[in-house]
Amino acid sequence: MRKLIFAINTTLDGCVDHTKQIGDEETHEYFTHLMRDVDLLVCGRKTYELMVPFWPEVAKTQSMTKASNEFAKTFDSINKIVFSRSLDSAQDRKRELFGATLATKYAN
């Protein structure tokens, strides 16, 4: 049986909004280490759209800090499932999109 790891960035005051948080070197190093043993990422549309195409582009260009570049390469290498009721396609080559019917089925 495989492990299931739940990870979310949360500030001390409870903020989980990725648009209001800035990952520092330590945060990127931590999540890179955590994701190295991950086979599959599962996310919703909003998280997916915040991460892609940004991190795959960084993985390709290696245009950020060492820790961010490593995070980008690791993130880009992992297969993804995206649950969305409104997204018709996804830009990532390593993803599978589940629409409203299936997303609802798995959410219950």
Image: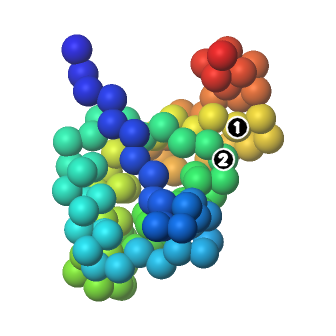
**Residue shown at 39% from the left, 39% from the top:** 6
Quadrant position of the N terminus in the picture = top left
Q: Tell me the crowding category of disc 2: few under 14, some 14 to 19, or many 20 or more residues within 10 angstroms, Cα based.
A: some
**Residue designated by label 2:** 45
- Residue type at mark 2 is Arg
**Residue shown at 63% from the left, 29% from the top:** 98
* Residue 97 seen in render: yes
* Residue 53 seen in render: no
- Left or right: 23 as drawn, with respect to 50: left
Image mark for residue 56: none
- Residue type at mark 1 is Ser
Q: Nearer the viewer, residue 89 or 86?
A: 86
Q: Is residue 5 above or below residue 13?
A: above
Quadrant position of the C terminus in the picture = top right
Residue 11, percent from left and from top: 48, 67
Residue 57, percent from left and from top: 45, 70
**Residue designated by label 1:** 84
Dividing the picture into quarters, in which one does residue 62 lie?
A: bottom left
